[in-house]
Image (cartoon, rainbow, N blue to C red):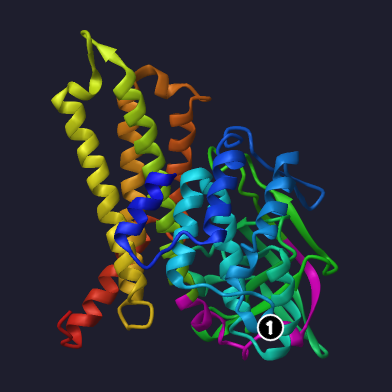
Amino acid sequence: MDQLMNILGSFNPGWKRTAWVEDLVSLLKETVIPSYSFLDVKIEDDQAVFPPEWSQIVAALKGMGLFRLFVPPAYGGIGSSEEDIYLIMELLGYASPGMGVIFVSHGRAVDIILEGNENQKNQYLPRMAEGEFGAIAMTEKGAGSDAGAIGLLAKRNGAGYLLKGEKIFISNSGLANLYTVLVNTKGAKASDALSLFVVERSTPNFWVKALPEKDGLKILPTGRLVFQDSPVSEENRVGQEGSGLLRCVHIIDRGKIHIAGICCGLAYRIFREIYRYVNLRRQFDHPLTQSQDISFQLSDMFTRISAARALCCHALKQIQTPYFSLYSAQAKLLASQMVMEAASKAQMLMGGRGYFKNDLINQLSTDARGMEYLEGTSNVQKMLIAKRLFRVYREGTNH
């Protein structure tokens, strides 16, 4: 991981190896990476059930203040820059991509609550700074990237609402205590029909259900959220009715950058593992690295990792500009495609060993495939990129 830190520093000299970075790197090297192959999770009785090592890891992360980095100082955190959060995601992507996605979902929940009023911020953010996990729940069976099709209904009930319906493929299911949920408050398909609510895990008539086992990202609890007339106070609504989708757009774009960062970290881990293998593996009395074909494949792999990381770093600098949505979609598209290509090449270079289920390269490859589905598939990103490009040129903006 020291080489990864040096590479990241070359892309952004402003990133420094602070005390919390050193602590995080030590934890990842000493605990997370060695336990990567067997750290998994199940959802049972509405709870995410982890191996014993998970509690030790989370306790260490709390101790080093990682949770506080996502929360502003005014609400019990210490705050951090976008570059620092990206750095965290690359490091987690290298060590455990599934753990990285856990913190992407958590960070996005923090972002949504930051869109709320002062009472909501003071009520929830200090808890999240102390280590309570959050989650964001948007996806439904009939509503993935088409958020306008969301059918989870929030009906008025006196001074509050009753939530009825389901969410599916929700990261941090059974782990989070706070769920930021996008619901339909009008019962019609329209962009102004969607509203955001913070739902506590203890809410009556709210259950977390398991999904079939995933092929990869084993440590990431992914499940269904079931609401059966679950009572939620009006005080739990973030913003006005109908403002939910608009509030989510920028937050979703930030999530794409973070997922792209996980992809870059994972791709570098794959590169390191396969480079180590081909450097030791001998064929016809020579290491495989002396083969021009293999050395070219490794060169191409590393170049594409660098290109994806450079686009991520460029997108980070666009957060306060009108072009952020365009560049975040590009970064996620390139990075998720790049990591799948790196994984496929690595398995081929490994030969038959790479096909065994318990081989590390195979496990990293299943994680790589899972990254494309998060924050929108490649086709969804292409659709968003085209839409924004057409808008730019239609408005006559030279960029």
Q: Residue at x 14, y 26 (%)?
A: 292
Q: Position of residue 151 (x, y in %)?
A: 61, 71
Q: What stretch is highlighted in magenta?
A: 226-250
Query: Residue 262 vs residue 50: left or right?
Result: left
Q: Does the rendering let one see residue 266?
A: yes
Residue 64 or residue 180, whichever sits in front: 64
Q: Residue drawn 80% across and 71% down?
A: 230
* Residue drawn at (72%, 46%) of the image: 56
State the image coordinates of residue 340 (x, y, percent, origin top left): 36, 43
Residue type highlighted by circle 1: Lys
Nearest the viewer among 233 and 39 is 39
Picture layout, residue 349 above or below residue 341: above
- On whether residue 228 falls in the magenta region, the answer is yes
Could you tell whether 209 is left or right of 303 in the image? right
Q: Name the residue under label 1.
A: 121
Q: Quadrant of the C terminus?
A: bottom left
- Which secondary structure lies at badge 1? helix
The percent position of residue 314, horizontal first and vertical second, equals 29, 68
Between 378 and 104, the residue placed more toward the observer is: 104
Q: Please give the name of the residue rendered at 69% of the width and 59% of the height, measured from the top-left corner.
A: 62
> Residue lying farthest right?
204
Task: Report whether 373 appears left or right of 140.
Answer: left
The relative height of residue 236 versus residue 7 in the rendered view (above or below) is below
Report if residue 190 is visible in the image: no
Q: Quadrant of the N terminus?
A: top left
Does residue 215 lie above or below 173 as drawn?
A: above
